Amino acid sequence: MGFFFLRRAPVAMKSGKVVLFGCNNAVGQPLSLLLKMNPHVEELVCCSTAVDGAVPAAGVAADLSHMDTLSKVRYARDEAEWPALLRDAQVVLVCSGSSFDPLREDRDIALRGSAPAVRRVMRAVATSDTKAQLAIVSSPVNALTPFCAELLKRSGTFDPRRLFGVTTLDVIRTRKLVAEALHMNPYDVNVPVVGGRGGVTACPLIAKTGLRLPPEEIIRITSEVQSYGVPVEAAVGADTHDAISTEVAPPVALGLAFAACDFAVSLLKALRGDVGIVECALVESTMRTEVPFFSSRVELGRDGVERIFPMGPLTSFENELIETAVPELVKDVKAGTEAASKE
């Protein structure tokens, strides 16, 4: 008796071209891997800057080329190739820098370290005339997003619908912690995190979910989101392998890479025409009159930001979070715009 196999017709899936700057640093390398594995990425272009580490973009691309996935991998040999490679990109991820500061404790150090490389990337973006969505992953996101906006405004190429500060790491951490507290699958939990990226600027609006959590649990989860863990002394009696210390800023390279990939895929889905794609991101808005950039729930579309959702009624605790966050966010945005004015 013979065997035969039924072959399914291939499903047409529109996928996109992603250009990644900082492909060879601590976040960029695992992010490159995740993008190469993702079916929504048709082509990945690896680019490196002077601050991203010793491994060249060519080395990362060569390593990725061994993987048996359909996405093509290319790389930029030097900065002169950036504009041509950017021209037909759908998504540009700016991940350049050696400092990824989740706690915002070293904002000025991170800004000084990342700004020169990001400035060169924005120059290439402006000269390429690309219509890509620009996602800023580099730290400090709260400062570098307005920094990029100022540079693009000067060149006459700024489109507020297409520039995003990636705050997804705060979102996925909040989702995980809420799901753990309720013994749920994180896939079934969606918690908006507004304000900014990292530290006290990250404001989880847990009450918006309608999930029943006691106030003390909401306070605990919010504290963990803003501090990226709990102090060692608070974990006495707990399994030491699960305790996270904030005495030293915890590494976030793998988590940030996962978050950046997650956001990039949402952009690609929206670009291919999927509807109802909503993510939290730092975007230019009038959500708060004190500051021109604020992280909000944003509906994504083919042209980038389709709609910015209002926060709606807040609990007294959430109001307190926002009022604490805004002055810090004002400082971050000011630092970014001032840095843009310095050559």
Image: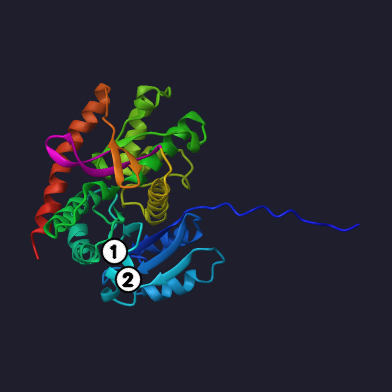
Q: Using the rendered image of the protein, determine whether residue 24 is visible from the camera's viewpoint.
A: no
Circle 2 Cα neighbour tier, 10 Å, few/some/many (<14 / 14–19 / ≥20): some
- The count of marks equals 2
Identify which residue, 67 or 207, lies in the foreground.
67
Residue lying at 43% horizontally and 43% vertically, measured from the top left: 274
Residue 98 has which mark?
A: 1
Where in the figure is residue 214, as x and y percent of width and height?
39, 22
Where in the figure is residue 52, as x and y percent of width and height?
30, 68
Residue that carries the numbered disc 2 in the rendered image: 53
Mark 2 secondary-structure assignment? loop
Residue type at tag 1:
Ser
Where in the figure is residue 98, as x and y percent of width and height?
29, 63
Chosen colour scheme: rainbow
User: Which tag, 1 or 2, sits closer to the chain's start?
Assistant: 2
First to last magenta residue range:
276-297
Rendering quarter of residue 29: bottom left
Rendering quarter of residue 93: bottom left
In this view, the residue farthest toward the right is 1
Q: Using the rendered image of the protein, determine whether residue 174 is visible from the camera's viewpoint.
A: yes
Q: CA distance from mark 1 to mark 2?
A: 8 Å
Mark 1 secondary-structure assignment? loop
Residue lying at 42% horizontally and 50% vertically, measured from the top left: 265
Identify which residue, 199 or 333, lies in the foreground.
333
Residue type at tag 2:
Gly
Q: Main secondary structure of the magenta part?
A: strand
Q: Are marks 1 and 2 in contact (CB under 8 Å)?
A: yes
User: Against 82, is 214 above or below?
Assistant: above
Query: The C terminus appears in which quarter of the rendering?
Result: bottom left
In reply to whether residue 284 is colored magenta, the answer given is yes
Left or right: where does residue 151 sit relative to residue 161?
A: left
